[in-house]
Image: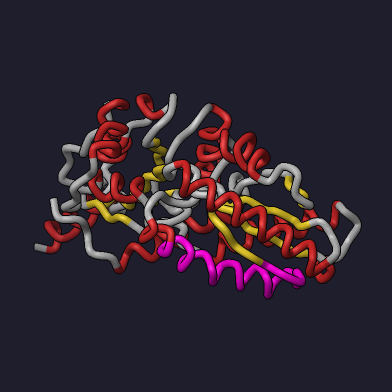
Amino acid sequence: MLRSLVLLAVTALTLPAQAAPTTGTILIAHGGDSTWNAGVREVAAQVRTGGPVEVSFLMGPGAATARFQDAVAKLDAQGVARIVIVPLLVSSHSGHYEQIRYLAGQDVQLDETMQHHLHHAGIARAQSRTPLVLTPALDGSIEMARVLADRALAMVRAQGDEPSRRGLLIVGHGPNSAEDYAGWMGNLRPLADSVRAWTGFRDVRLELVRDDAPAPVRAEAVLRTRELIEMQRAITGRDVIVVPVLVSKGLVSRDKLPRDIAGTPSIYTGEPLLPHAAMARWVERRVRESAATAVTAR
């Protein structure tokens, strides 16, 4: 009997230790040109969750080679116990978040445009038994506020000035519908309040240019943005610092927003959220918080 127990103990000591089940993460973003996508990959490389991290895109030239179902398959092959899907979007109030909900297996009816985007890139739901957990998007997170505060302070200091003598306008891409616009603004107003408290800018405002909305809606949003800049200039007597709440460098930050505010008394450099290190910390927090989230029904 004693000999048998000793043999069992020796056998147990010599067996290879089994790795603890891990969590895999998919950082999924809109996607854009190579520069836009590089910012996402740079942040993904900084994420430390204790498990593997994959990147996926919904649109753009890189989407076909970074498909959602392929990211899931790669994580499955590594034996993860669960997969956390982290949408790198400014707001959960968007058609792209609905696309991600659909891919995560939730009961979502996509409109024709959103379906076309996925079909065009060959993106589909994954065939996997691994539990999937979908987190919220950025949605006014404290990390996003930190990035915007850092960007704004760097710009005002480059002017040799103090934030207490300047106005700050935070400008986002924004959604198409009035309902989603209200949702975005509801997410972002507390963010603007945090930026004001941390930086001490004299006047902080927020607006969305609604870049993909019908032409009359977008024109009204751009006019409102320009009027806010003029109003802030009248309040402070100085050119207004304009910071974009955009994920990565691309067409909107580089071309469209500069055109929208051209001729206004403003200072704009176009630095987006990525690749600020706070974005990697946000991903890590979303993964930690997901431990208390119910998995998607499969």
Comparing 166 with 139, the one in front is 166
Name the spot of residue 152 as percent of width and height, x first: 73, 57
Q: Is residue 66 left or right of residue 110?
A: right
Q: Is residue 256 above or below residue 199?
A: above
Name the spot of residue 58 as percent of width and height, x first: 37, 36
Q: What residue is rendered at 76% in x and 59% in y?
A: 153
Comparing 231 with 248, the one in front is 231
* Residue 272 shows in the view: yes
Check the picture and name the quadrant holding the N terminus. bottom left
Comparing 212 with 158, the one in front is 212
Comparing 51 with 281, the one in front is 281
* Residue 70 shows in the view: no
Q: Is residue 200 above or below residue 75?
A: below
Q: What residue is rendered at 38% in x and 66% in y?
A: 289
Q: Residue furthest right?
A: 160
Name the spot of residue 155 as percent of width and height, x first: 78, 53
Q: Is residue 191 above or below residue 144?
A: below
In the rendered image, residue 201 lying in the magenta stretch gets the answer yes
Dividing the picture into quadrants, the one containing residue 42 is top right
Dividing the picture into quadrants, the one containing residue 178 is bottom left
Magenta span:
182-204
Q: Is residue 13 left or right of residue 63?
A: left
In the rendered image, residue 257 lying in the magenta stretch gets the answer no
Q: Main secondary structure of the magenta part?
A: helix
Q: What residue is rendered at 47% in x and 41% in y?
A: 215
